[in-house]
Amino acid sequence: MAGISCNDQLKHPEDFAVSCQFQNISSDCAFYHPSQVSSPDNLLFSLGIYYHKTWMTPQSALNLSFPSPTWTEIKFRYEKLYYGDNVLCRRFTLMNLSQPLVDTLFWDCPFFPFPEDSTEQLIKLTLVSDEGEGGSYIFTRPSATRVDVLETSLQNWHTFFFVHIDHMYTSASLPITLQLAPHKFGPLSYNISLVKCVDGKKCQDRAVLASELVTPSENDTEVTELLPTWSNIAWYAVTVQIVSPLCLNGIINNCYVAVSPPFGVAVSKVLIWMCIIMGGIIICAFTFFVVINKRIKQTRRMVMELKKKPVSVLFVYLPETQESLKLVYNLADFLSGFYIQPYLIDKLAGSQHPNQWTLNHLKAADRVLFLIPNRRDAEGVSHIHGQWDFVLHLLLGYLCSRDRDVNPEKISVITFPFSGEIPNEIISLQHFQLPKSIDPLLTWIHGRTWLDNIFLRCPLIPSMVYWNKDQLKELRKTITEASNAATKQKHMYNQEQKNCRDIMTTIPDKLLPETDTEYNSQNVEPVKNFKEDTVSIISGLFDDQIPSVFTVLEDKVLDHTQHTSNESVKEEGLDMSLLID
């Protein structure tokens, strides 16, 4: 672009409708950091420095140009480092211009960020385009006497460069862009070094960490070189020194050393949070270890006590089938693997009266398990009968009495998939449904928490756990078998009831007399004939189910005798038990 003046309004020579505007920003100078850092090989700008002589005092002036811009607006901010709020902001706006531009857009005016200071200045430049691209760069603005092409010697020449400071914290390489010395000095090499400031921000005492020797070609005006980054917490700087035989004094290079503004690598917030998290994890792990160790010791003492005195558990059950009885025995065997002493009336009552044995152990046992059968009116297959009903009525008395010899909290109700309804007498007690509530049941029996249960079953007695796993598998299998047997028995019971109802609909027509006059107080023979006829008919129709129809038959006979009002039948005292003799 040509024809650019210093009047803030920039004109294009071919189309006067196209314009660029360069304006000062008095507010909104603290804009956000760019979301995308520019690549070192494709910067949005080109920054140079040159000697500018005025009628007052010569200055080192900056020139900022933009090669082939693709943006419509860009803001840049100069900040004088370590001097508080000493900042300067500018904005470029492109209008009525097709993108991208092929030429370089530049402002052909001397630019002095802080003209009141003619000495070296440490400056940070930040650029952000309307597309969110840009970056931050730090450099040292030299004094005018060190960049005078006509007067400054090679030994005193300040090589201008800027550091792409964003890359120090985000990548493994730190780009450095140099503006080469004038060609009048001939071909030169440059020693670029990353140094550590031993004395902190002053950076007078420096230790070299990494160096690169760069020899540009004759046609280059600027070069970009990469140095390794350093992540240790410290202050760093970049130095550039011309390497030429003209500067050598023996083995000492007397060329001027240009130093960038010092920059520090502070503690990363991510690192701080990582340290906090790691510290929290260590503290939690230590606390967990201490708690676990204490719990294990307590559990060991508990196990030693249980070995000496296992928890006594009384089983109250009504086995309707052999499979149900086997289930009771398997459940007792399974629980005995966890330091539990089961009390089974079939095995321990001996010659003692069952009710007295049950009453004694009901009071003495630590826990009582009330196993719910399929039918509470069924007849058990074990050789001892009546325990279930006895305890049920006994508990009703205890629960309704103020003076309790048995604590209801030590009694629980155990249900299976085949269990019937829970009796109202014990429906308020704690329930466990097997097999899915094995763990809660063990915890309740031992009177411990779930944590105690875990420590008891897993870390201390692993061999017993494996054994108990097999027992649990066998217990599940037995529950399935008992459920199948209960289903089959229930089906048979329902069929019996149906057959009985069918029979009883035909009995009155064959057995009952046609008129009431056949019965009188002087003659009870018809009653005897009635008994005999009833037995013969029932035996002929349904020999194997006489006990099943007895209850229904007894109700019908009693109803008929009451209806006839025959006092002799009452005196005779018809004993219906004769029907099944």
Image: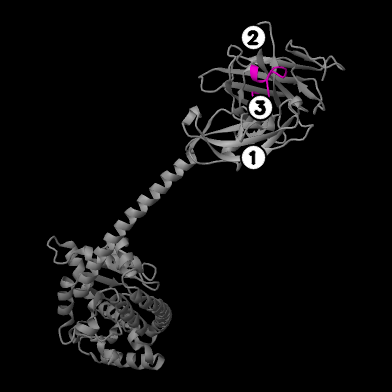
Majority SS type along the magenta span: loop
Q: CA distance from mark 1 to mark 3?
A: 15 Å
Q: Residue at left 25%, top 68%?
A: 300
Q: Residue furthest top?
A: 55
Please check the rendered image and state whether residue 246 is part of the magenta-colored stretch, yes or no: no
Question: Which residue has dot 2 on it?
Answer: 57
Q: Position of residue 64 (x, y in %)?
A: 70, 22
Q: Position of residue 142 (x, y in %)?
A: 62, 21
Q: CA distance from mark 3 to mark 2?
A: 21 Å
**Nearer to the camera, 206 or 402:** 206
Q: Position of residue 572 (x, y in %)?
A: 19, 87
- Left or right position of 520 against 325: left
Question: Start and end of the magenta stretch?
Answer: 145-160
Q: Amino acid at mark 2?
A: Thr
Q: Dot 2: what SS?
A: loop
**Mark 1 or mark 3, earlier in chain:** 3
| Residue 244 in sight in this render | no
Mark 3 is surrounded, within 10 Å at the Cα level, by few (under 14), some (14 to 19) or many (20 or more) other residues, namely many
Label ID, residue 212: 1
Q: Amino acid at mark 1?
A: Glu
Question: Which residue has dot 3 on it?
Answer: 159
Please check the rendered image and state whether residue 156 is part of the magenta-colored stretch, yes or no: yes
Q: Dot 3: what SS?
A: loop
